[in-house]
Image: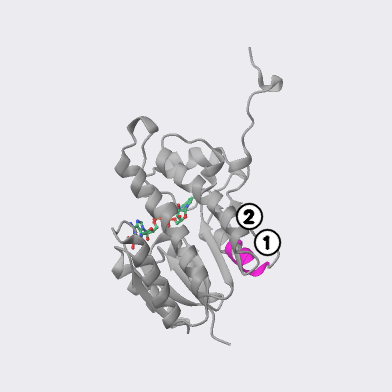
Amino acid sequence: MHQQAAVITGGATRLGRHFAEALADAGFDIALHVNRSRDEAEAVASGIRAKGRVCEIFHCDFLSENLNEELGNLIQAAKQRFPGLNLLLNSASAYEPAPIAKTELAMLETQFRVNVFTPLLLTRHFANVVNEGQVINIIDNKVAYHQYPYAAYLLSKKSLAEMTRMAALEFAPRIRINGLAPGVVLPASQRTSDYVQWRIDGIPLKQQGTPAHLVQALNYLLENPFVAGQILFVDGGESINLEGRHSENYRY
Ligand SMILES: NC(=O)c1ccc[n+]([C@@H]2O[C@H](COP(=O)([O-])OP(=O)(O)OC[C@H]3O[C@@H](n4cnc5c(N)ncnc54)[C@H](OP(=O)(O)O)[C@@H]3O)[C@@H](O)[C@H]2O)c1
């Protein structure tokens, strides 16, 4: 039996860092993907090694011209370093705002390359080198909405959610595939406290999520062998708060 190991994309910063550390706590050695945040990746790797796990850093820019080849090389190298590779966690993401009226081709390409093409191609390469395992895709609770000010981002995440269900079917029973859809947890740095409070006001459980809430959900997906093709929303119920119009709230 080989020691189990995980590839995690975008694992050097923010939520990705929390996921990488949680996987190390759960007993995985870590193939930590990084693009620009190399210093942060070194710090995360040191922390994981201090937990007694092996951690190697793998670089890849998901906007590379030779994306498919580079992703294939990444998975091959991770499998060679970690023969017990059995988990792929796709957390890396591009997040650019624009409504459809202002969406350029370049933005669509960036959003779809990082948020859909990369997880899909990594899943394909992963499935080619492992006998069995799991894939977890980090999505976004806003796939429940039509939030057009982030049209390209949101369409890419909706597509990732569909890809998650499709791949879960294609690769079952050998590979178990699920998604995790966070709500308000670590808002982007430009968000003001007023904005965050406004979001919390619209959340039925009236609270902001924490990385620990997501880690708990990640561990649930990892541990429950009867769950496949699901998108687990961890968002305080925000995504079910779609009252719509009906006679009870007709005010005129
Ligand atoms: N934060 C939240 O509250 C929240 C809410 C809903 C959904 N999510 C989802 O949860 C996941 C993690 O969220 P986050 O806020 O921690 O993400 P983030 O800060 O937006 O970015 C995560 C990572 O994506 C990587 N990345 C971006 N462009 C890349 C490229 N061209 N090539 C390779 N890597 C690239 C970055 O790597 P480098 O830094 O190394 O370049 C970064 O570490 C994402 O999928 C996000 O959509 C987060």
Residue topped by disc 2: 230
On-image quarter of the N terminus: bottom right
Give x and y (percent) for residue 44.
Answer: 39, 72
Is 210 located above or below residue 32 in the figure?
A: above
Most extreme residue toward the top, as rendered? 252
Residue 61 lies within the magenta run: no
Q: Is residue 10 left or right of residue 106?
A: right
Q: Secondary structure at mark 2?
A: loop
As measured in the structure, the alpha-carbon distance from the residue carrying label 2 to the one carrying label 1 is 7 Å
Residue positioned 45% across, 76% down in the render: 30
Give x and y (percent) for residue 149.
Answer: 41, 35
Span highlighted in magenta in the image: 217-224
In the depicted view, which residue is nearer to us: 120 or 235? 120
Q: Is residue 44 left or right of residue 248?
A: left
Q: Which mark is residue 200?
A: none
Q: Is residue 141 left or right of residue 251?
A: left
Residue topped by disc 1: 227
Give x and y (percent) for residue 114.
Answer: 39, 54
> Which kind of residue does numbered mark 2 sit on?
Gln
Residue positioned 55% across, 49% down in the render: 162
Mark 1 burial class by Cα count in 10 Å: few <14, some 14-19, many 20+: some
> Which kind of residue does numbered mark 1 sit on?
Val
Q: Cβ–Cβ below 8 Å for labels 2 and 1?
A: yes
Quadrant of residue 31 within the rendered picture? bottom left
Q: Is residue 182 visible?
A: no
Residue positioned 53% across, 52% down in the render: 163
Is 245 located above or below residue 127 in the figure?
A: above
Residue positioned 63% across, 55% down in the render: 230
Q: Is residue 178 left or right of residue 46?
A: right
Q: Secondary structure at mark 1?
A: loop
Does mark 2 have its CB less than 8 Å from ligand 1? Answer: no
Residue 221 lies within the magenta run: yes
